[in-house]
Structures are given as C-alpha cells and as structure tokens.
C-alpha cells in the first residue's frame, strides 16, 4: 500500500484530533490535553411484540450531547445530557387504543476515562482505559396524563442516582480500528422502584473503505463500521421485590458508516437485534437508529 509521509502523519495524529470510533459505546483513544470533543447523536428506538396482550408499542427519540475535555494526556472527563421524547401506545382493558407520552431532559451522565496502558508505534496504537461515572436524576420521573402517572420505562428520567464503570480497549492502525468494552451499571432506586443492573460487552470494527490507498490532498476518509452489543438486564424491583416479568438478554449487530476529516466526523449506524431472550413482559426491540456528528476543537 502506498503511504506518503504526509498521509501517515495526518492519520497518526488522529487520536488527538478526529478519528473513527465505535458509534454505540466509548473508545480508549484520548482527547488531546486542553482540547474538547463534542459529539451529537440523534437516536430513534422502537420496541414491540408485546406478550401481555396489551399490544404495547414503545417509541423513543433522544438527542444526546456529549462533551469531552482532555484534562491531561491520559485523563479525559465527559458530560452527557439527553433530550428525550418517549411514547407508549397501549390498548386499555376496555379495548380502547391510547397514546401516552412524555418528554424533556433525560438523566445526565458525568464520567472520567483514564489511559492506563498504551503502546504506540509508527502507524498504529493500542490503548486500555478504565472509566467510571455517575448518572444523575436530571430527568422527570413523575410525568403523567389523563390516565395517571406514566409507567417507569416511559418516564424521561429514572429519579435515581446510578453508578457505572468498565474498561475499554482500542487498537488503531492506518487502515482500521478495533474497540472492545466491558461495562456495568448499578441502578439504585427511587420511590420504591429500581431498574435492574445492566452488564454489557461491546465490540466494534471500523475499516477504511475510501481511499483504498493513502495519498496527498485527500479531504477525509470513509469508514465502514460494524458493531456488536451483548446486553443483560437484571429484573426491576418494586417495594424491594423483584419483578420476574422484567429483564433479559439481547444481542445487537450495528452496521454503519463514518466520514472522518481532520476536525469533524459524520456518522450513522443501525442497531438490529439478532437474539433476544426477554422475560414475560419485556418488549422486544425492533430497531435502534443513530445519526450524528463529532467535532474536535
């Protein structure tokens, strides 16, 4: 493969500028010291297949803003704030079809990621970074309508302070990048209700499909991406008792595209469920679509 020195230098600098990255989770690549990265994602989620007979269909839109700051060469701090709109269509006991919805601020996330290990070489880098943070109850959890208070999954927020953490590893070369993450969220309760803890294992590959050969004068790089997300949710609890109808395990594949320039990235991906083992009352995800951009400054 032809690799002019200028092109190699530009790609080698990508960890401190813009870079290809996983679209459904974080990456171990650092943000340059004193620099910021802003990521905006519009996420649409639809779930159905109600096994209870109520014919529930859940749709949700969220606009998620994530701001990261390179505090040191190894430490990056992040703040994420979503705007959400959730809608639940359901058939009542009288047979009437109703629409219930709520929107506004969701729960904010504050977390830090530290590069604990790095191995750099010309044209490639490998990094491992643990991360930890907290989800704050900035979204409402008491929204209601003429039928009363909305079910907890339809609320903009959880009402609880939750902790999460994990570790992410990234292998980046001039042609491709591989990211792997293991993470765990410990959900606490509010008003006697608590969502179940969540454990997940994620992976993503980003491969440069254009230009196939590196050369001078190229304004950006097009990457094909493929992610995988294995997510297990424990049962929710109400008044200290577990709800055996909730929780379950899901596996998603997420094909997508990213166009990467020196300072900004355009990206899109679709998460498709390939396996879902849900308990009795769980709604099955049909599709999760993501569209966004990322800017480094």
Image (tube, rainbow, N blue to C red):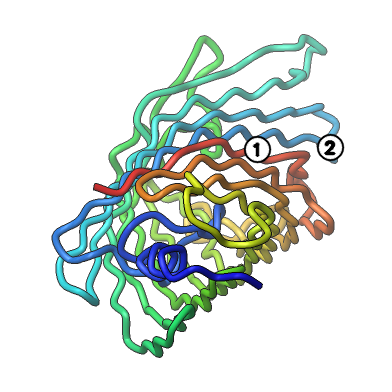
Q: Position of residue 68 (x, y in %)?
A: 27, 54
- For label 1, the residue is 289
Mark 1: secondary structure: strand
Vertical placement of 73 versus 189: above or below?
below
Mark 2: secondary structure: loop
Q: Nearer the viewer, residue 115 or 82?
A: 115
Q: Nearer the viewer, residue 69 or 154?
A: 69
261 with respect to 285 (left or right): left
Q: Residues under labels 1 and 2: Cα distance?
A: 18 Å
Residue drawn at x 55%, y 39% is 153
- For label 2, the residue is 49
Q: Position of residue 134 (x, y in %)?
A: 30, 60
**Residue 182 appears in the rendering:** yes
Residue drawn at x 32%, y 86% is 116
Q: Nearer the viewer, mark 1 or mark 2?
A: 1
Q: Position of residue 180 (x, y in %)?
A: 57, 74
Near mark 1 (Cα within 10 A), the count class, few <14, some 14-19 or many ≥20, is some
**Residue 176 appears in the rendering:** no
Q: Earlier in the sequence, mark 1 or mark 2?
A: 2
């Amino acid at each position: 493969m032809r690799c002019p020195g200028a092109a190699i230098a530009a790609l080698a600098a990508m960890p401190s500028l813009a870079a290809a990255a996983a679209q459904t989770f974080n990456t171990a690549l650092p943000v340059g010291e004193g620099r910021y990265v802003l990521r905006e994602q519009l996420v649409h989620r639809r779930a159905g297949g109600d096994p209870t007979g109520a014919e529930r269909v859940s749709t949700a839109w969220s606009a998620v803003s994530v701001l990261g700051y390179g505090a040191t060469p190894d430490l990056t701090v992040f703040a994420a704030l979503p705007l959400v709109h959730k809608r639940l269509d359901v058939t009542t006991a009288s047979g009437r079809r109703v629409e219930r919805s709520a929107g506004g601020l969701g729960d904010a996330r504050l977390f830090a990621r530290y590069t604990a290990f790095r191995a750099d070489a010309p044209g490639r880098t490998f990094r491992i970074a643990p991360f930890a943070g907290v989800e704050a109850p900035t979204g409402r959890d008491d929204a209601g309508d003429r039928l009363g208070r909305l079910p907890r999954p339809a609320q903009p927020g959880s009402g609880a302070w939750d902790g999460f953490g994990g570790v992410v590893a990234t292998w980046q070369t001039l042609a491709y990048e591989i990211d792997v993450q293991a993470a765990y969220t410990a959900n606490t309760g509010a008003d006697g209700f608590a969502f179940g803890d969540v454990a997940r294992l994620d992976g993503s590959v980003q491969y440069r499909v254009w230009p196939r050969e590196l050369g001078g004068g190229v304004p950006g790089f097009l990457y094909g991406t493929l992610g995988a997300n294995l997510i297990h949710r424990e049962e929710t609890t109400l008044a200290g008792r577990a709800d055996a109808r909730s929780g379950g395990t899901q596996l998603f594949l997420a094909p997508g595209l990213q166009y990467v320039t020196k300072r900004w990235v355009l990206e899109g991906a679709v998460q498709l469920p390939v396996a879902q083992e849900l308990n009795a009352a769980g709604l099955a995800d049909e599709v999760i679509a993501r569209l966004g951009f990322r800017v480094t400054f």
